[in-house]
Amino acid sequence: MRTALTIAGSDSCGGAGIQADMKTMTMNGVFAMSAITALTAQNTTGVTGIMEVSPEFLAMQIDAVFTDIRPDAVKTGMVSSDKLIRTIAEKLRGYKAENIVVDPVMVATSGSKLIADEAVETLKSELLPIATVVTPNIPEAEILADMKISSQDDMITAAKVIGEKYGCAVLCKGGHSLNDANDLLWDNGCTAWFKGKRIDNPNTHGTGCTLSSAIASNLAKGFTLEKSVERAKDYISGALAAMLDLGKGSGPMNHAFALTGEFAKEA
C-alpha cells in the first residue's frame, strides 16, 4: 500500500485539518500518517483557540514517520508560526521527501485567521521552493503573487508569478465569487483548467484540506500531477454532492460518500 503524510493542525470538529486529511487519504486508497502542528478548538462556526506544538516535538513526529514508514507523498496544511515552517522545510529537505503538496492555509472557510503575519514570509522562502505543487485559493494567491485577482486571466498571471518565483507547480483554486470553482493548474509554463461541478451546497468546511490531500494521495499512487488534480476534483465533487448537513455554520463534507461494505452498514 502506498503511504502519505499530512503535516497540519487538528480540527476538533473533524471536518478540516488532520482529520479531513486522514479521511481523504484513506478513501483515496493510501495509508495515512500525521504530524500535528497545532491543536485547535474549532467547529463549523469558527476557531476559538489554537495551541501550537513546539518545533522540537514537531520534528520528533516527522522523524518518527520517515525513519519507519517512509511516505510516498507529503501534504502540508495549517502551520501558524515561522519556527514550525522552518522545522518542516528542514526535515523534508533532509529526508529528500517527494511529491510535496503545500496547501498555504492562511484563512479558515469561516473567515478566521490561521497564520501569523511573519509566518507568511517564511512559508514563501522555506516551503514553496521545495513544493511539487502549491494549492492557494484566490485570497491566498493574491498574497503569494502580491496582486489583485478579479478574472480568470488574473488567475493565470498570478499562478505564473508564483510558479516562476518559487519553482513549483501552482493550482490556483477558483470560487470566491470569481467562477464556478474552476481551478487552474500552472506547471512549468503549461496551463490546464479543471472545471468544477456546480453543487449548491453551503457546507464547504475543509474543502481546501480535502483537495490537497486527495492530490497527494494520487501522486503517492503514481498518477501524474494533472491526473492527480483531476481525480481529486472528482472526489471532492462527490463528497460535496452527498449533501451532508451537520453543524450550525459551514458544515463538513461527507468524506466517506463512496464507502460501502459490511462495516459501513447502519443498524
Image: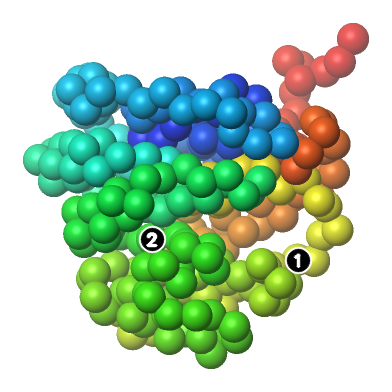
Residue 212 picture location, percent across and down: 49, 50
Residue plotted at (62% across, 49% down): 111
| Residue pointed to by mark 1 | 197
| Outermost residue toward the left in this view | 94
153 or 261, which is in the foreground? 153
Quarter of the rendering occupied by the N terminus? top left
**Tag 2 and tag 1, C-beta contact below 8 Å:** no
Q: Tell me if 125 is positioned left or right of 104 in this view.
A: left
Q: Is the residue marked by circle 2 packed among few (<14), some (14-19), or many (20+) residues within 10 Å?
A: many
Q: Position of residue 56 (x, y in %)?
A: 18, 22
User: Can residue 220 be seen in the rendering of this structure?
Assistant: no
Question: In the rendering, at what x and y percent does residue 204 appear?
Answer: 71, 48
Image position of 31 (left or right of 70): right
* Residue that label 2 marks: 134
Q: Amino acid at mark 2?
A: Val
Which mark lies nearer to you, 2 or 1? Answer: 2
Which amino acid type is shown beneath numbered disc 1? Lys
Mark 1 packing: few (<14 Cα in 10 Å), some, or many (20+)?
Answer: some
Marker count (numbered):
2
Q: What mark, if any, has residue 97 been given in the picture?
A: none
Ranked by sequence position, the earlier of labels 2 and 1 is 2
Residue 195: image location, x then y, percent: 66, 73
Tag 2's secondary structure? strand
Residue 135, above or below 169: above
Quarter the C terminus occupies:
top right
| Quadrant hosting residue 152 | bottom right
Identify the residue at image location x=30%, y=35%. 71
Secondary structure found at label 1:
loop
